[in-house]
Image: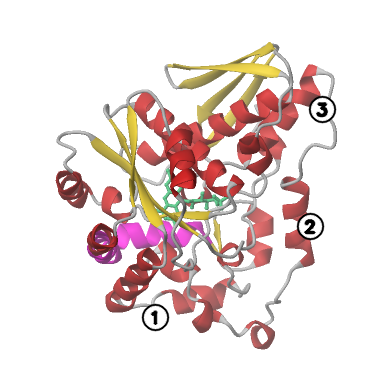
Amino acid sequence: MTTRRTVLQAAPLLAAPALLGGCDRSSAYDAAIDAQRRHADELAADTRAVQRELLRYATLAANSHNTQPWRFESLPDAIVIRPDLQRRTPAVDADDHHLWASLGCATENLVQAATAFGRRAQVALAGDRVVITLAADAARRTPLFEAIPQRQCTRTDYDGTPVSSADLRALAAAAVAPGLRCELIVDRARLDNVAQFVAEATTAQMQDPRFVAELKAWIRFSDAESLARGDGLSARATGNPSVPRWLGSLMFGFIVSAERERARYLQQVRSSSGLAVFVSDRNDRAAWVEAGRAYQRFALQVTALGLRTAFINQPVEVPALRAQFGRWLGLGDARPDFIVRFGRGPLLPHSLRRPLDEVID
Ligand SMILES: Cc1cc2nc3c(=O)[nH]c(=O)nc-3n(C[C@H](O)[C@H](O)[C@H](O)COP(=O)(O)O)c2cc1C
């Protein structure tokens, strides 16, 4: 059995694209990425056009398994985001923590973009709706806004070089939010401790057939599949070639062992400059949305600094290990929301999003 990261990082084993009809570089895929990840040429004047641009920026946010579990509604002075419960991932995210955090990520991109488009955004959670009220303000393009199209989850080894104290301060500042703390870990011995938690949790997930089946359903093995669906975990986004689904499916069960995974994660953590653990005081939807917003600001700041980041959430996704991990961090009852690593590495191909018209009501 395997995990999302395994299949997505199994380049050597899947690297036979010419032989198998895949292609090294898909112009259709790249064209779709370019169209989705462009900055607006100019600030649109009318409200409808502005809101459509804000929604495009929102959809470029990080989101669990790239399920894009959101529905948007444009009102005259507000945008509403609702969860799309058809896109739940109950095996990895039984209580919808990641789903609500994903809405938080989209909310934060929207807030950052609103500032650039001369709108002040106020966010409130009302039942199952995130309501973002927009009021006129001076237009200001911030470094976080500028980073939106380039931000990505970069699932590769980094170069291990340290990040300066000034950059660490900037990362911590970006993640400041009410009821949440972001603990940065750069000490090598502590990084190794976290790596052991990641290895153990990875093994637990690999032994869970529900987790593996759900993951497989969200993997897009070929460019054609990615383009047709516009969602999911595309192999290309982690530097792997496009292969037909039959091959990807065939390889799925063969490519990894728990041992190889353990080694891979130890290496990924060791190659990172540091880790950030996001911890909420409360454990409810409002806190999960807030944590998603803080993570997204952190990831945008990472990008603005020319760094890379990726989640290594396994220890917070396996409930028994989440409690152990929390105790190791000295958290008491507080819930660790996410674990992410950061460092210097290459930019990989981006992942696709569904067309806007598919997510607007
Ligand atoms: C709440 C949340 C949890 C995530 N957990 C993981 C994870 O454990 N491992 C991983 O590789 N990616 C994880 N991701 C990253 C998503 O898979 C990624 O955001 C999505 O595929 C879109 O790609 P992009 O962020 O590069 O645009 C997570 C994202 C969110 C918002």
Counting other residues with Cα less than 10 Å from the Cα at mark 1, is it few (<14), some (14-19), or many (20 or more)? few
Q: Residue at image x 55%, y 26%?
A: 81
| Residue 67 place in picture, x, y as percent | 52, 46
| Residue 87 place in picture, x, y as percent | 48, 42
Q: Is residue 188 left or right of residue 43?
A: left
Kindly check if marks 3 and 1 are in contact, taking CB atoms under 8 A apart as contact: no
Amino acid type, mark 1: Phe
Q: Is residue 296 left or right of residue 330?
A: right
Q: Which mark is residue 43?
A: 3
Amino acid type, mark 3: Leu
Circle 3 sits in a helix, a strand or a loop, which is it?
Answer: loop
* N-term mark: 2 or 1: 2
Quarter location, residue 342: bottom left
Q: Which mark is residue 31?
A: 2
Circle 2 sits in a helix, a strand or a loop, which is it?
Answer: helix
Quarter location, residue 330: top left
Relative height, residue 177 to residue 136 (above, below): below
Counting other residues with Cα less than 10 Å from the Cα at mark 2, is it few (<14), some (14-19), or many (20 or more)? few
Is residue 1 among the parts visible in the rendering? no
Identify the magenta region.
197-219
Circle 1 sits in a helix, a strand or a loop, which is it?
Answer: loop
